[in-house]
Image (tube, rainbow, N blue to C red):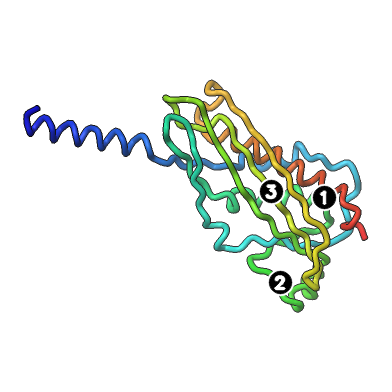
Amino acid sequence: MKPIHLIRAIVVTGALASLAGCAHDITISGDPTAFTATSTASAAPINKTIGLIITDELRTKEVITPGGGGDKVTYKPYRDLELPIYVELSHVFTNVVKLNTAPDQATFRSKSLNYVVIPTISTTSSSPSLLTWPPTDFSVTLICTVTDPDGKLVTKHEVTGNGHAEFGEFKRNFGLAAQRATLDAVQKLQAAMQDAPELRQ
């Protein structure tokens, strides 16, 4: 092979490799009204005020997981799930307060908090496609730890939501499987919280 042809082959190969490994931005929570419209609430809200703690650092945390065609997807799970979690908890408790940091005793008193909720989020994604990058399968695992003003554990719940989307469904919504997983997860979280007798004491 002539040197000029060899150089061209190396450049083309490198370009293809870089394209195959790129990460595409998606949003893993969809229309906020979906979380209200599909509420699983079946009992009166618990008459408590809780603080939902998601720090600014967590909101900016970026996660990268596999898509199809050798590509990956990137998203910010805490930023995307903050509102869905807030909405679903609002169906469980009479009042939910967003907090950027763990509250001290003075904040507990000033905001009349009974409990604080600390969510931990993990995700997975995959797709069998060799040609298209959006993930067809997605999972969202939520672990919510509830503590009292003294920092003692009240209850802890872990739920996993799963979402699937076929290629023909994507259109312009490339995060559809992820959004379905988020909806499934927060609905399961709401049901788990409603069924926890510790939170009604």
Mark closer to the chain start, 2 or 3: 2
Q: Secondary structure at mark 3?
A: strand
Q: Residues within 10 Å of mark 1 (few under 14, many from 20)?
A: many
Tell me the residue at 68%/55% (across/down).
119
Left or right position of 6 against 190: left
Query: Residue 94 appears in which quarter of the rendering?
Result: bottom right
In the image, what residue type sits under mark 1? Met
Q: Position of residue 174 (x, y in %)?
A: 51, 33
Question: Which residue is the site of mark 3?
Answer: 142
Q: How far across and down, in percent of the image, does residue 19 sit?
A: 33, 36
Amino acid type at image mark 3: Leu
Query: What amino acid does circle 2 point to?
Result: Pro
Name the disc covering residue 193, or none.
1
Q: Tell me if label 2 and label 3 are in contact, CB under 8 Å.
A: no
* Residue 29 coordinates in the image, percent (x, y): 61, 42
- Marks 3/1: CA distance? 12 Å
| Location of mark 2 (residue) | 103
Q: Quadrant of the N terminus?
A: top left
Which disc is residue 160 wearing? none
Horizontal side of 76 relative to 191 (left or right) equals: left
Q: Describe residue 165's horizontal placement relative to residue 14 as left or right.
A: right
User: Judging from the image, what secondary structure is the residue with disc 2 in?
Assistant: loop
Name the quadrant of the C terminus. bottom right
Mark 2 → mark 3, Cα distance in angstroms: 21 Å
Furthest-top residue in this view: 168
Q: CA distance from mark 1 to mark 2?
A: 21 Å
Query: Tag 2 or tag 1, which sits nearer the N-term?
Result: 2
Whether residue 1 is situated above or below residue 189 in the rendered picture: above
* Percent of width and height locating residue 2: 6, 29
Whether the residues at callouts 1 and 2 have beta carbons within 8 Å, the answer is no
